[in-house]
Amino acid sequence: MSNSSPHALTAHWKKFLAVGVVALAIVWFFACKGAGNHDYRQGLSVLVGSLFWISILIGMLMLTMITRVFDAGWAPLIRRNWEHLIIALPILLIIGVAPLAFNSTFRHLLWEWTDATHMLPSGHAVGADPILQAKSWFLNENFFLARIALYVAIFGTLAVLLRRWSFAQDTDRTAGHTHRLHAVSAVGIPLGAITLTMLAFDCLMALSYHWFSTMYGVWFFALSIRLALAVTVILTYKLSNGGWLDGLLNQAHRHVLGCLMLAFTVFWAYISFSQYFLIYTANIPEETFWYNIREIDAATGFKSQWWGVSMYMIFGFFFLPFLSLLPYRTKIVPGRLLTVAWIIVAGALADLWFNALPRQMTQTDLTNYPEGFSVAPFLTSALFLDLLAIIGFGAVVIAIFLRSASRNEAIPVHDPRILESINYHE
């Protein structure tokens, strides 16, 4: 992928698709095998792997609409790459999250509240749980499945409209397309915010249905934007070195991306700390247990290995990129900014693991994992499958990106602000 022609660069999309199909076939095979043994860990590999890329694409979708609404002069060159990618969002929901939700075996294993006969550690069935009964207006199977379908429809509609009118403007030069894109974005931002919040509630927070946090959707938004910006830096670095952005992407573009990465690093930390601080100070058992199972080994009462992961997120996912992005040169030197981007990608994956993997032990879990949900056995038991799922879904996303780029202009040639974007300066 070194030829500067976008059509030559996209000649390998079928190879990426083949890699994705093979990788996901292996992942789904082991997930189904695990489900047959009443082990939900392999299903979590599918969930985490798909949500990793879904969060990236949600961030890009939101950034596409935000830059449209604010008419950002720097954005058109970079936004075109987001437009190539966002169409993968509904596809990943269909091949990743939807099969887990609509298959009763996976659904009952991952989201235990959907199985009324599931036995809680207290010895009572889920169906008799007063906490679930109080939430049943929202946490019921039919409404849950309807919401999953709605996420596909909403994100898919926004992605299709944003792409259709942007690509149409490349050929007919109609200014009306820009006005339509502004209107769709103005409606799409609050609609997308509500949808991504509900998606975070259903796919992650509902894994421990007793727990709740009103800040959870904002945390997922912050994580998605951080990931989207980091992947954008990695992608534009590649495309500006022998790709179709070679000679077009300049220091000012890197600077604005670096500034946004710094801003959302601080925002992510603020939301994450606020959630922890409020739950810690309130000290309500229905809330604190979520952090307790991520910090304390129930068998010994001492700090667990998950506590080490939480320390990594504080120092490796916040302080390291935060302090690195403060200097001006980090934001303009390609290699330095690229390094910080990879640090954020690794930290975001750890954050998803931290949110999705630990849960209260049931009798089935004790049988499958007698050593508990510590990081060493529980993460490494399916770590290869986690990474393979990320590679599989990622290969599908790259294939979709390359195929879209091969059929449309590499840059939005008739965008009203394309010249301003090409000549953007600090």
Image (cartoon, rainbow, N blue to C red):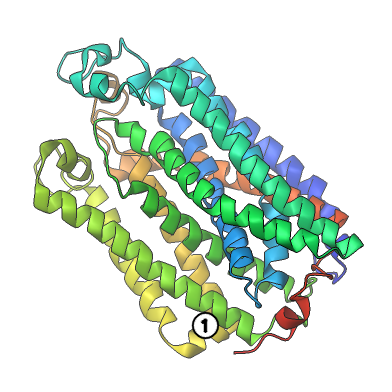
User: In the rendered view, does 272 fall on the left or right side of 299?
Assistant: right
Q: Write the residue at 15% across / 45% down.
A: 296
Q: Write the residue at 29% across / 57% down.
A: 272
Q: Write the residue at 28% across / 21% down.
A: 367
Frontmost residue, 236 versus 151: 151
User: In the rendered view, does 300 fall on the left or right side of 263?
Assistant: left
Decide if residue 190 is in sight here. yes
Callout 1 environment at 10 Å: few (<14), some (14 to 19), or many (20+)?
many
Q: Residue 118 in the image: x percent, y percent?
A: 30, 14
Q: As displayed, is residue 74 above or below residue 204? A: below
User: Hey, what amino acid is under mark 1?
Assistant: Lys
Decide if residue 402 is in sight here. no
Q: As displayed, is residue 247 above or below residue 110? A: below
Q: Quadrant of residue 71?
A: bottom right
Q: Residue 342 in the image: x percent, y percent?
A: 51, 66
User: In the rendered view, does 169 fall on the left or right side of 138?
Assistant: right
Frontmost residue, 11 versus 185: 185
User: In the rendered view, does 420 fall on the left or right side of 204?
Assistant: right
Looking at the rendering, in which quadrant would you find the C terminus? bottom right
Q: Write the residue at 48% across / 71% down.
A: 261
Frontmost residue, 72 versus 306: 72
Q: Residue 48 in the image: x percent, y percent?
A: 47, 41
The residue carrying mark 1 is 331
Q: As displayed, is residue 253 above or below residue 134? A: below
Frontmost residue, 8 versus 228: 228
Outermost residue to the top: 117
Looking at the rendering, in which quadrant would you find the N terminus? bottom right
Q: Residue 148 in the image: x percent, y percent?
A: 52, 30
Numbered disc 1: secondary structure: helix
